[in-house]
Image (cartoon, rainbow, N blue to C red):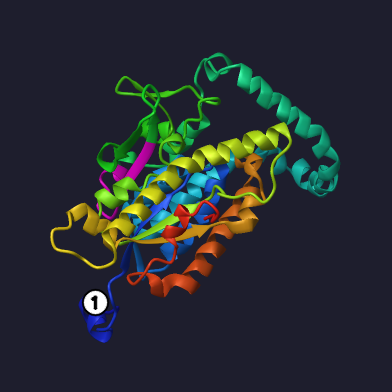
Amino acid sequence: MPASPKNAARKNPTRRPPHQIDLALQGGGSHGAFTWGVLDRLLEDDTLEIAAISGTSAGAMNAVALAAGLMDGGREGARRVLRQFWTRVAELSPFHHIRTSPLGTLLAPASDWLAPWVKPWTDPLKHASDAIGLQISPYQLNPLNLNPLRDILEETVDFQRVCGCHKMKVFVAATHVRTGALRIFGQHELTADMVLASACLPLLFQAVEIDGEAYWDGGYAGNPSLLPLVSETRTDDLLLVQINPMQRESVPTRAGDILDRINEVTFNASLLKELRTLALMKQMVGDKPRAGTPAMLRRIQQLRVHLIDGGTPLSSLGAGSKTETQWSFLSQLHLMGREAATQWLRRHRRDLGERSSFDLGGVLDPEQAL
Protein backbone atom coordinates (compact mmCIF):
# COMPACT_ATOMS: atom_id res chain seq x y z
CA MET A 1 0.00 0.00 0.00
CA PRO A 2 1.52 3.37 -0.98
CA ALA A 3 2.35 5.74 1.83
CA SER A 4 -0.09 8.58 2.42
CA PRO A 5 1.21 12.15 1.98
CA LYS A 6 1.02 12.55 5.77
CA ASN A 7 3.12 9.42 6.39
CA ALA A 8 5.54 10.41 3.62
CA ALA A 9 6.06 13.77 5.32
CA ARG A 10 6.84 11.96 8.60
CA LYS A 11 9.43 9.79 6.86
CA ASN A 12 11.11 12.84 5.35
CA PRO A 13 10.55 15.67 7.85
CA THR A 14 13.50 17.71 6.55
CA ARG A 15 12.16 17.98 2.99
CA ARG A 16 11.64 21.61 2.11
CA PRO A 17 8.87 22.97 -0.09
CA PRO A 18 9.94 23.83 -3.66
CA HIS A 19 11.76 27.14 -4.06
CA GLN A 20 9.70 29.59 -6.09
CA ILE A 21 11.12 31.40 -9.11
CA ASP A 22 9.69 33.80 -11.67
CA LEU A 23 10.59 33.38 -15.35
CA ALA A 24 11.02 36.03 -18.04
CA LEU A 25 10.94 34.39 -21.48
CA GLN A 26 12.29 36.26 -24.48
CA GLY A 27 10.87 35.93 -27.98
CA GLY A 28 12.89 34.92 -31.01
CA GLY A 29 10.97 32.84 -33.54
CA SER A 30 11.80 29.15 -33.72
CA HIS A 31 14.67 29.74 -31.29
CA GLY A 32 11.89 29.62 -28.71
CA ALA A 33 12.45 25.85 -28.88
CA PHE A 34 15.62 26.54 -26.87
CA THR A 35 13.37 27.99 -24.15
CA TRP A 36 11.18 24.89 -24.43
CA GLY A 37 14.28 22.85 -23.54
CA VAL A 38 15.02 25.09 -20.55
CA LEU A 39 11.44 24.74 -19.27
CA ASP A 40 11.48 20.99 -19.87
CA ARG A 41 14.55 20.68 -17.64
CA LEU A 42 13.24 23.01 -14.92
CA LEU A 43 9.95 21.11 -14.76
CA GLU A 44 11.90 17.91 -14.03
CA ASP A 45 13.36 19.51 -10.89
CA ASP A 46 10.81 19.18 -8.09
CA THR A 47 12.88 21.42 -5.80
CA LEU A 48 11.81 24.37 -7.96
CA GLU A 49 8.35 25.83 -8.55
CA ILE A 50 7.51 28.36 -11.26
CA ALA A 51 5.41 31.07 -9.63
CA ALA A 52 4.94 33.40 -12.61
CA ILE A 53 6.01 33.84 -16.23
CA SER A 54 6.28 36.98 -18.32
CA GLY A 55 6.59 36.04 -21.98
CA THR A 56 6.82 37.71 -25.36
CA SER A 57 6.21 36.15 -28.79
CA ALA A 58 7.60 32.59 -28.67
CA GLY A 59 8.11 33.13 -24.95
CA ALA A 60 4.39 33.86 -24.58
CA MET A 61 3.51 30.69 -26.48
CA ASN A 62 5.75 28.62 -24.22
CA ALA A 63 4.15 30.29 -21.21
CA VAL A 64 0.53 29.52 -22.11
CA ALA A 65 1.39 25.96 -23.16
CA LEU A 66 3.06 25.41 -19.79
CA ALA A 67 0.15 26.92 -17.85
CA ALA A 68 -2.46 24.84 -19.69
CA GLY A 69 -0.42 21.69 -19.17
CA LEU A 70 0.07 22.35 -15.46
CA MET A 71 -3.68 22.44 -14.97
CA ASP A 72 -4.16 19.33 -17.10
CA GLY A 73 -1.54 17.10 -15.50
CA GLY A 74 0.93 18.94 -13.28
CA ARG A 75 4.60 19.02 -14.27
CA GLU A 76 4.32 16.08 -16.66
CA GLY A 77 1.22 17.63 -18.20
CA ALA A 78 3.15 20.86 -18.81
CA ARG A 79 6.03 18.97 -20.43
CA ARG A 80 3.54 17.07 -22.60
CA VAL A 81 1.71 20.16 -23.88
CA LEU A 82 4.98 21.99 -24.60
CA ARG A 83 6.16 19.04 -26.70
CA GLN A 84 2.80 18.86 -28.48
CA PHE A 85 3.02 22.57 -29.33
CA TRP A 86 6.51 22.38 -30.84
CA THR A 87 5.70 19.11 -32.62
CA ARG A 88 2.80 20.84 -34.38
CA VAL A 89 5.09 23.74 -35.31
CA ALA A 90 7.38 21.24 -37.04
CA GLU A 91 4.51 19.37 -38.68
CA LEU A 92 3.29 22.56 -40.34
CA SER A 93 6.77 23.18 -41.77
CA PRO A 94 6.63 23.09 -45.59
CA PHE A 95 9.51 20.57 -45.50
CA HIS A 96 7.97 18.22 -42.94
CA HIS A 97 5.93 15.99 -45.24
CA ILE A 98 8.76 15.76 -47.76
CA ARG A 99 11.37 14.86 -45.16
CA THR A 100 9.16 12.29 -43.37
CA SER A 101 8.04 10.53 -46.56
CA PRO A 102 9.79 7.33 -47.73
CA LEU A 103 11.36 9.30 -50.58
CA GLY A 104 12.57 11.97 -48.17
CA THR A 105 14.14 9.29 -45.96
CA LEU A 106 15.98 7.83 -48.94
CA LEU A 107 17.17 11.23 -50.14
CA ALA A 108 18.17 12.58 -46.69
CA PRO A 109 21.86 11.56 -46.94
CA ALA A 110 22.09 13.02 -50.43
CA SER A 111 20.39 16.25 -49.38
CA ASP A 112 22.85 16.63 -46.49
CA TRP A 113 25.76 16.12 -48.89
CA LEU A 114 24.32 18.60 -51.39
CA ALA A 115 23.49 21.28 -48.80
CA PRO A 116 26.80 23.21 -49.08
CA TRP A 117 26.40 23.31 -52.87
CA VAL A 118 22.74 24.31 -52.83
CA LYS A 119 23.12 27.06 -50.21
CA PRO A 120 24.80 29.60 -52.56
CA TRP A 121 21.73 29.33 -54.78
CA THR A 122 19.08 29.34 -52.08
CA ASP A 123 20.53 32.30 -50.18
CA PRO A 124 19.96 34.77 -53.05
CA LEU A 125 16.37 33.49 -53.33
CA LYS A 126 15.88 34.11 -49.62
CA HIS A 127 17.28 37.63 -49.93
CA ALA A 128 15.04 38.27 -52.94
CA SER A 129 11.97 37.13 -51.01
CA ASP A 130 13.01 39.35 -48.09
CA ALA A 131 13.31 42.31 -50.45
CA ILE A 132 9.84 41.62 -51.85
CA GLY A 133 8.52 41.42 -48.31
CA LEU A 134 9.80 44.91 -47.65
CA GLN A 135 7.86 46.22 -50.65
CA ILE A 136 4.58 44.36 -50.22
CA SER A 137 2.68 44.52 -46.94
CA PRO A 138 0.93 41.49 -45.42
CA TYR A 139 -2.37 43.25 -46.13
CA GLN A 140 -1.59 42.80 -49.84
CA LEU A 141 0.37 39.56 -49.71
CA ASN A 142 -1.95 37.79 -47.24
CA PRO A 143 -5.37 39.46 -47.62
CA LEU A 144 -7.15 36.55 -45.88
CA ASN A 145 -4.84 37.04 -42.88
CA LEU A 146 -3.97 33.35 -42.67
CA ASN A 147 -1.76 32.48 -39.70
CA PRO A 148 -0.82 28.83 -39.04
CA LEU A 149 0.14 29.72 -35.46
CA ARG A 150 -3.53 30.29 -34.67
CA ASP A 151 -4.37 26.71 -35.59
CA ILE A 152 -1.44 25.39 -33.53
CA LEU A 153 -2.43 27.40 -30.45
CA GLU A 154 -6.09 26.44 -30.68
CA GLU A 155 -5.22 22.76 -31.14
CA THR A 156 -2.70 22.44 -28.33
CA VAL A 157 -3.55 25.10 -25.71
CA ASP A 158 -6.76 25.14 -23.67
CA PHE A 159 -7.14 28.84 -22.87
CA GLN A 160 -9.86 28.17 -20.32
CA ARG A 161 -7.25 26.25 -18.34
CA VAL A 162 -4.73 29.06 -18.84
CA CYS A 163 -7.13 31.70 -17.52
CA GLY A 164 -8.10 29.46 -14.62
CA CYS A 165 -4.57 28.38 -13.76
CA HIS A 166 -4.04 28.83 -10.01
CA LYS A 167 -0.57 27.28 -9.98
CA MET A 168 1.24 30.24 -11.54
CA LYS A 169 0.65 33.67 -13.03
CA VAL A 170 1.09 34.45 -16.73
CA PHE A 171 1.78 37.84 -18.34
CA VAL A 172 1.95 38.40 -22.11
CA ALA A 173 3.46 41.49 -23.74
CA ALA A 174 2.33 43.18 -26.96
CA THR A 175 3.00 46.54 -28.60
CA HIS A 176 0.12 49.00 -29.13
CA VAL A 177 0.48 50.07 -32.76
CA ARG A 178 -0.95 53.61 -32.50
CA THR A 179 1.06 54.70 -29.46
CA GLY A 180 4.00 52.26 -29.43
CA ALA A 181 3.24 51.61 -25.76
CA LEU A 182 3.72 48.32 -23.98
CA ARG A 183 0.51 46.40 -23.24
CA ILE A 184 0.58 43.61 -20.69
CA PHE A 185 -2.25 41.10 -20.98
CA GLY A 186 -3.00 39.42 -17.67
CA GLN A 187 -3.71 35.77 -17.27
CA HIS A 188 -7.42 36.14 -16.42
CA GLU A 189 -8.13 37.61 -19.86
CA LEU A 190 -5.74 35.68 -22.11
CA THR A 191 -6.95 34.49 -25.50
CA ALA A 192 -5.26 33.07 -28.57
CA ASP A 193 -5.54 36.52 -30.17
CA MET A 194 -3.51 38.10 -27.38
CA VAL A 195 -0.72 35.55 -27.77
CA LEU A 196 -0.80 36.01 -31.55
CA ALA A 197 -0.57 39.78 -31.01
CA SER A 198 2.55 39.20 -28.91
CA ALA A 199 4.08 37.32 -31.87
CA CYS A 200 2.82 39.55 -34.69
CA LEU A 201 5.75 40.61 -36.86
CA PRO A 202 4.28 43.50 -38.87
CA LEU A 203 6.02 42.60 -42.15
CA LEU A 204 4.65 39.05 -42.01
CA PHE A 205 1.20 39.35 -40.45
CA GLN A 206 -1.58 41.90 -40.25
CA ALA A 207 -1.88 43.64 -36.89
CA VAL A 208 -4.03 41.75 -34.41
CA GLU A 209 -7.08 43.69 -33.26
CA ILE A 210 -8.20 43.36 -29.64
CA ASP A 211 -11.10 45.45 -28.38
CA GLY A 212 -10.81 47.66 -31.46
CA GLU A 213 -7.08 48.37 -31.02
CA ALA A 214 -4.26 47.03 -33.18
CA TYR A 215 -1.21 45.28 -31.72
CA TRP A 216 2.18 44.14 -33.00
CA ASP A 217 4.91 41.92 -31.62
CA GLY A 218 5.63 42.60 -27.96
CA GLY A 219 9.36 42.53 -28.65
CA TYR A 220 9.30 46.18 -29.70
CA ALA A 221 8.17 47.32 -26.24
CA GLY A 222 9.10 44.49 -23.87
CA ASN A 223 11.14 41.42 -24.80
CA PRO A 224 10.27 40.21 -22.26
CA SER A 225 8.82 42.75 -19.87
CA LEU A 226 10.16 42.41 -16.33
CA LEU A 227 7.71 44.97 -14.97
CA PRO A 228 4.82 42.60 -14.11
CA LEU A 229 7.20 40.21 -12.33
CA VAL A 230 8.43 43.09 -10.16
CA SER A 231 5.07 44.74 -9.50
CA GLU A 232 2.60 41.80 -9.49
CA THR A 233 4.47 39.00 -7.70
CA ARG A 234 6.34 38.50 -4.44
CA THR A 235 8.93 36.04 -5.68
CA ASP A 236 12.48 37.26 -5.07
CA ASP A 237 14.31 35.11 -7.67
CA LEU A 238 13.78 36.19 -11.28
CA LEU A 239 15.27 33.98 -14.00
CA LEU A 240 15.61 35.49 -17.48
CA VAL A 241 15.82 33.09 -20.44
CA GLN A 242 17.48 35.04 -23.24
CA ILE A 243 17.68 33.82 -26.83
CA ASN A 244 18.68 37.01 -28.69
CA PRO A 245 22.43 37.67 -28.39
CA MET A 246 23.38 41.11 -27.09
CA GLN A 247 26.80 41.04 -28.70
CA ARG A 248 28.23 39.90 -32.02
CA GLU A 249 31.96 39.52 -32.53
CA SER A 250 31.96 40.78 -36.12
CA VAL A 251 30.31 43.69 -37.91
CA PRO A 252 27.84 42.51 -40.58
CA THR A 253 28.54 43.66 -44.14
CA ARG A 254 25.96 41.79 -46.23
CA ALA A 255 22.48 43.25 -46.55
CA GLY A 256 20.74 40.23 -45.01
CA ASP A 257 23.17 40.05 -42.10
CA ILE A 258 22.81 43.80 -41.47
CA LEU A 259 19.02 43.48 -41.34
CA ASP A 260 19.29 40.49 -38.98
CA ARG A 261 21.54 42.44 -36.61
CA ILE A 262 19.21 45.46 -36.71
CA ASN A 263 16.38 43.17 -35.64
CA GLU A 264 18.46 41.70 -32.81
CA VAL A 265 19.38 45.16 -31.51
CA THR A 266 15.76 46.33 -31.79
CA PHE A 267 14.36 43.33 -29.93
CA ASN A 268 16.94 43.62 -27.15
CA ALA A 269 16.57 47.37 -26.59
CA SER A 270 13.47 47.19 -24.39
CA LEU A 271 14.99 44.44 -22.22
CA LEU A 272 18.20 46.42 -21.76
CA LYS A 273 16.19 49.47 -20.77
CA GLU A 274 14.30 47.56 -18.07
CA LEU A 275 17.48 45.88 -16.77
CA ARG A 276 19.24 49.24 -16.55
CA THR A 277 16.28 50.74 -14.71
CA LEU A 278 16.38 47.89 -12.19
CA ALA A 279 20.14 48.31 -11.78
CA LEU A 280 19.85 52.05 -11.15
CA MET A 281 17.05 51.59 -8.64
CA LYS A 282 19.03 48.90 -6.83
CA GLN A 283 21.99 51.27 -6.62
CA MET A 284 19.73 53.98 -5.26
CA VAL A 285 18.22 51.92 -2.43
CA GLY A 286 21.40 50.01 -1.54
CA ASP A 287 21.57 46.59 0.07
CA LYS A 288 20.35 47.34 3.58
CA PRO A 289 16.67 48.03 4.36
CA ARG A 290 15.93 51.56 5.56
CA ALA A 291 12.96 52.89 7.48
CA GLY A 292 10.48 54.67 5.24
CA THR A 293 11.61 53.00 2.00
CA PRO A 294 8.57 52.67 -0.33
CA ALA A 295 7.25 49.14 -0.82
CA MET A 296 8.21 48.99 -4.51
CA LEU A 297 11.79 49.99 -3.76
CA ARG A 298 11.99 47.39 -0.99
CA ARG A 299 10.73 44.85 -3.52
CA ILE A 300 13.49 45.79 -5.97
CA GLN A 301 16.02 45.75 -3.14
CA GLN A 302 15.21 42.12 -2.41
CA LEU A 303 15.09 41.01 -6.05
CA ARG A 304 17.71 38.49 -7.17
CA VAL A 305 18.32 38.22 -10.93
CA HIS A 306 19.57 35.17 -12.82
CA LEU A 307 20.20 34.43 -16.50
CA ILE A 308 20.18 31.41 -18.80
CA ASP A 309 21.16 32.01 -22.40
CA GLY A 310 22.24 29.93 -25.35
CA GLY A 311 25.75 31.38 -25.46
CA THR A 312 27.89 30.79 -28.52
CA PRO A 313 26.08 27.64 -29.75
CA LEU A 314 22.77 29.49 -30.10
CA SER A 315 24.12 32.80 -31.38
CA SER A 316 26.24 30.99 -33.99
CA LEU A 317 23.05 29.75 -35.66
CA GLY A 318 22.35 33.29 -36.85
CA ALA A 319 19.14 35.30 -36.82
CA GLY A 320 18.09 33.89 -40.19
CA SER A 321 17.56 30.46 -38.65
CA LYS A 322 14.69 31.80 -36.52
CA THR A 323 12.30 30.90 -39.35
CA GLU A 324 13.48 27.27 -39.61
CA THR A 325 10.90 24.86 -38.21
CA GLN A 326 12.10 21.40 -39.20
CA TRP A 327 11.78 18.92 -36.35
CA SER A 328 15.48 18.05 -36.44
CA PHE A 329 16.34 21.73 -35.92
CA LEU A 330 13.76 22.27 -33.16
CA SER A 331 14.95 19.11 -31.42
CA GLN A 332 18.52 20.38 -31.54
CA LEU A 333 17.43 23.65 -29.93
CA HIS A 334 15.45 21.75 -27.29
CA LEU A 335 18.53 19.73 -26.34
CA MET A 336 20.63 22.91 -26.21
CA GLY A 337 18.09 24.46 -23.84
CA ARG A 338 18.05 21.41 -21.57
CA GLU A 339 21.83 21.39 -21.39
CA ALA A 340 22.01 25.13 -20.68
CA ALA A 341 19.49 24.72 -17.84
CA THR A 342 21.38 21.72 -16.46
CA GLN A 343 24.64 23.64 -16.45
CA TRP A 344 22.99 26.66 -14.81
CA LEU A 345 21.45 24.53 -12.07
CA ARG A 346 24.80 22.86 -11.43
CA ARG A 347 26.55 26.21 -11.02
CA HIS A 348 23.90 28.42 -9.46
CA ARG A 349 21.28 26.36 -7.65
CA ARG A 350 22.74 27.46 -4.30
CA ASP A 351 22.45 31.10 -5.34
CA LEU A 352 18.66 30.84 -5.36
CA GLY A 353 17.33 32.48 -2.24
CA GLU A 354 20.76 33.92 -1.44
CA ARG A 355 22.18 36.18 -4.14
CA SER A 356 21.93 37.21 -7.79
CA SER A 357 23.98 35.03 -10.13
CA PHE A 358 23.76 37.68 -12.86
CA ASP A 359 25.70 40.94 -12.50
CA LEU A 360 22.84 43.38 -12.96
CA GLY A 361 25.20 46.33 -12.52
CA GLY A 362 27.11 45.20 -15.59
CA VAL A 363 24.35 46.46 -17.89
CA LEU A 364 25.23 50.02 -16.82
CA ASP A 365 28.70 49.58 -18.35
CA PRO A 366 28.50 50.14 -22.12
CA GLU A 367 31.66 48.10 -22.61
CA GLN A 368 30.25 45.04 -20.84
CA ALA A 369 27.84 42.76 -22.66
CA LEU A 370 25.27 40.46 -21.10
Q: Quadrant of residue 183?
A: top left
Asked whether 275 or 311 is in front, the reply is 275
In the picture, the quarter occupied by the N terminus is bottom left
Magenta region: which residues? 161-173
Return the residue found at the far left. 292
Judging by the rendered image, the residue that carries numbered circle 1 is 4
Determine crowd level at label 1: few under 14, some 14-19, many 20+ residues with C-alpha closer than 10 A.
Answer: few
Q: Quadrant of residue 22?
A: bottom left
* The stretch drawn in magenta includes residue 165: yes
Residue 17 percent coordinates (x, y)? 27, 72
Residue 313 percent coordinates (x, y)? 64, 57
Asked whether 136 or 43 is in front, the reply is 136
Q: What is the secondary structure assignment of the residue under circle 1? A: loop
Asked whether 158 or 197 is in front, the reply is 197
Residue 311 percent coordinates (x, y)? 59, 58
* Residue 192 visible somewhere in the drawing: no
At horizontal 56% and vertical 47% (from top left) the residue drawn is 31
At horizontal 40% and vertical 31% (from top left) the residue drawn is 175
* The stretch drawn in magenta includes residue 151: no
Return the residue found at the far bottom. 11
Whether residue 96 sits left or right of residue 216 in the image: it is right
* Residue 283 visible somewhere in the drawing: yes
At horizontal 82% and vertical 36% (from top left) the residue drawn is 120
Q: Is residue 9 above or below residue 42?
A: below
Residue 347 percent coordinates (x, y)? 49, 73
Q: Is residue 190 above or below residue 76?
A: above
Residue type pointed to by label 1: Ser
Q: Quadrant of residue 18?
A: bottom left
Asked whether 328 or 273 is in front, the reply is 273
At horizontal 31% and vertical 51% (from top left) the residue drawn is 229
